[in-house]
Amino acid sequence: MGCKCEQPGSCFWYQTVTDREAYNACVKGTPPSPNGKPPCVYLGKVLDRQPRRVSKTAYGCMLHEQCTLEPAGRICNCQDCMDYTTRDDPKIGERFIDPLRITDRNGHDTTVLRNMLSGGAAFLVCGGPSLKELEYTRLAERGIFSMGVNNVAGYAPVSAFTCSDPPMKFHSGIFLDPKMMKFLPTPKLRGNRASIREKLPDGSFRYLDPKTCDCPNVWGYGRRSWLMPDETWFYDKEAAWGNHNAGVKRTGQPKTVCTMLLGLRLLQYLGAKRIFLLGVDFHMDPKRGMYENYSFGEARDRSACDSNNGQFVVVNQWLIQLRPVMERFGFEVFNCNPNSHLRAFDYCPFDVALEECRGLVPEEPWDLRFWYSKKMKT
């Protein structure tokens, strides 16, 4: 396997920082040797354009945009930075600041949503038919935060939605609902890839005038098409959803992608320390019938089932390898389907998960009498 980096700078795999010469040597098959203190996990590549009046080499920084290894007088530096964190830090789960790139509807970077769930628990809802066996309407209860993957967000009352395919493949009501947060890869906020459509009574479709960026409560996020089942899951401004051809060449991992992986990373960025999976069956059976392999009746023939099952095998192995990484960073994942073919995570009953997600929020109806009084129990 050749060099996995794209240019000189911080190298996660060899725990060092390369210059142009060392990088070129690595590309040709001679990897660099670690030298000195390990690089900060937020350190990036050498900047193509170096800042003016900075004598030291400047690098990209996932938290501070740019930095140097030593004090340079005008920009942040690793030597004095309070956020400096290394891969082997035993307290990385407490110190880590997720650098995932989130934008508003206009494509402007923002951090206002980082850790918005304050370490609570949340559901990640997928479209497997096992969802129908649960009282999934309870996701609408007070205190419950959930993210739906793809069109299941139009089936279950989730709090948020994410996708990776073109938005036109997903129900227009999802995008038009102001109560639901929508997280889209940033290229799908503008242009032809931001088109949405509605379904007419006769079953045909037509495009709507608003684009995704015109819809309420829409957010963008960075997405990448390479994945290694290691700490690079977190050490990047873009969320990994698998490997396309370039990703296979870079990582040596199998070629497949899975939107559920994006939902996991988004919930982790939002601050969910415990994530409970619903509708994650990880197996399609053509014997069920054409419309029985999704909770909401989407068609899947034998060929499509076989293709999805091959994908599930790969993603299952990735998640088995990622589980200890996630736990080291302070995140736990549980599966509410005891019969799921996803074997990476332990089982948790749905009713137990509901109470975990509800936390301290009381069940309704709430007693609202006398709250305007300042009297306290002594």
Image: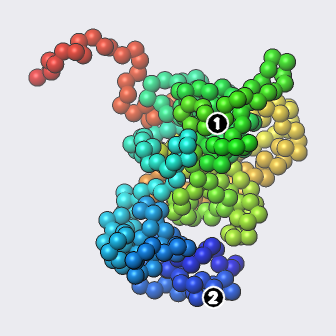
Q: Nearer the viewer, residue 215 or 348?
A: 215
Q: CA distance from mark 2 to mark 1?
A: 45 Å
Q: Is residue 228 visible?
A: yes
Tell me what residue is drawn at x 22 percent, y 15 percent. Answer: 372
Residue bearing mark 2? 25
Q: In this rendering, is residue 150 above or below 223?
A: above
Residue bearing mark 1? 212
Place residue 92 in its image quadrant.
bottom left
Q: Is residue 260 left or right of residue 303?
A: left
Residue 45 locus on image (x, y percent): 53, 72
Structural crowding at the residue carrying mark 1, measured as other residues with C-alpha within 10 Å and reported as few (<14), some (14–19) or many (≥20) = many
Q: Is residue 300 left or right of residue 90?
A: right
Residue type beneath disc 1: Thr
Q: In this rendering, is residue 59 above or below 314?
A: below
Q: Is residue 277 visible?
A: no
Q: Is residue 231 left or right of residue 194?
A: left
Tell which residue pokes out farthest to the left in this image. 378
Q: Nearer the viewer, residue 43 or 296?
A: 43
Structural crowding at the residue carrying mark 2, measured as other residues with C-alpha within 10 Å and reported as few (<14), some (14–19) or many (≥20) = some
| Secondary element at tag 2 | helix
- The type of colouring in the image is rainbow
Tell me what residue is drawn at x 86 percent, y 36 percent. Answer: 287
Tell me what residue is drawn at x 70 percent, y 29 percent. Answer: 209
Q: Nearer the viewer, residue 139 or 130?
A: 139
Residue 23 locus on image (x, y percent): 60, 83
- Image quadrant for the N terminus? bottom right
Place residue 54 in its image quadrant.
bottom left
Q: In this rendering, is residue 350 above or below 326?
A: above
Q: Is residue 74 left or right of residue 164?
A: left
